[in-house]
Amino acid sequence: MRSVDLIQKKRDGGELTASELTYLIDGYSRGDIPDYQMSAWAMAVFFRGMTPRETAALTLAMANSGDQVDLGPISGVKVDKHSTGGVGDKTTLIIAPLVASVGIPVAKMSGRGLGHTGGTIDKLESIEGFRTELSRERFMTQVNEIGLAVIGQSGNLAPADKKLYALRDVTATVESIPLIASSVMSKKIAAGADAIVLDVKTGSGAFMKTLEQSEQLAKAMVDIGTDVGRNTAAVISDMDQPLGFAVGNALEVQESIETLKGNGPEDLTELCLTLGAHMVVLGGKADSVEAAKELLRGQINNGEALAKFKAFVDAQGGDASVADDPARLPQAPITIEVKAEGSGFVEAIEAEQLGLAAMLLGAGRATKEASIDYAVGVTLRKKVGDSVQAGDTLALLHVRESSETTRNVADRVRSAYALNAEKPEPRALLLSVVTSEGITRYI
């Protein structure tokens, strides 16, 4: 078998077999296949695409390139959740304890943030003492004891994907849907869950800008999960404006706590209930999404979801008293109001610009090596559809000091808001659901 023959086969529109894809991935991982040949193959995939069978085989090859997490010692159906990333997306902080509170074990590995999207691990580490590294034995034991653990992703989980992604990033092949789908799902499969719920974002603050692109990606990932024997569902949600009001690590933890108390923003609450409901159905604790939503609402109302959050934080060494006293979270010393210069209704908010604004303040990383400031960020005061008068506060910046950078960030936030004289039609938050049975649109 020669890599050049496989490149030519894909270039000419052929379908590679599982053994041929394994040969490519294993050879590239070992360094036997050079970057220039793998780049040529990735570009051939970019233009020719992959069949569902090929995509599943590629995913398994990458999942098998490193550690495989065996969650067998954990009793029950283990359901994982993955988001494709967005601005203000703190859903794991809410969904994990909420779903665990109804008896579904949540054994989750999460990542750190890079660029304009925040990472769950960074948010959790804004809680004093919280440990995101646990031994495998402790991880399993904690899930069996309290139903929930969230740790940082293993460095050797799907290493072939990490190497291939770095190559795609510099060869203009990142946007290939089969390669994106296999990248996401290889890590989810290696992490060992029995079932997977995917939150696929679409809009200005997401990687996929259109609903059609997002549905293609969701279908590809659901097909992969189905082909490898994992029950998989995807919910496509809007990211044309930030989720909730808070953008920044400690700010998002505080908003998550309020949501678990039943006082959270409407959009954040609805998305968490929907994603959590799909997890509950796949976990066998409800027969329908609507019944699962009612079950989860009850867990918020009776305090069980918040109690599970406290137990989870305490088990991983964190200060669980932040649930009762959010002021114990890191606090920025200065708050700057971003004022509107005109009047009208908020027609649109460029979510990505607000994410970049928070990153420039120190809430995110421009490079993997950069450190972050847990206290800083942006809190929205106006969202799409809200009425605005000149001089009204559009958002608050939480900063360490007033400087040229913060003034530039304030201008960036202000310019992210588009005002119109007429009130816009309400935009749906939940757009589609994708299962093995097909695509169902909410709109």
Image (cartoon, rainbow, N blue to C red):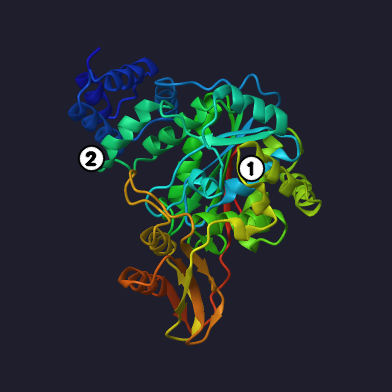
Q: How many marks?
A: 2
Q: Earlier in the sequence, mark 2 or mark 1?
A: 2
Q: Is residue 273 left or right of residue 385?
A: right
Nearest the viewer among 118 and 228 is 118
When asked about the image quadrant of residue 356, the answer is bottom left
The disc label shown at residue 313, or none: 1
In this picture, is 312 found above or below 333?
above
- The image position of residue 433, as x and y in percent, is 59, 46
The disc label shown at residue 171, or none: 2
Residue pictured at 34% horizontal, 21% vertical: 21
- The image position of residue 156, as x and y in percent, is 41, 25
Tell me the quadrant of the picture where the C terminus can be found: bottom right
Can the viewer see residue 440 in this picture? no
Residue pictured at 70% horizontal, 62% vertical: 263
- The image position of residue 38, as x and y in percent, is 24, 28
Alpha carbons under labels 2 and 1: distance apart: 41 Å
Q: Residues within 10 Å of mark 2 (few under 14, many from 20)?
A: some
Tell me the quadrant of the picture where the N terminus can be found: top left
Label 2: state its secondary structure.
Answer: loop
- The image position of residue 147, as x and y in percent, is 69, 33
Label 1: state its secondary structure.
Answer: helix
Q: Residues within 10 Å of mark 1 (few under 14, many from 20)?
A: many
In this picture, is 234 found above or below 384?
above
Residue pictured at 79% horizontal, 54% vertical: 301
Residue type at mark 1: give it.
Val
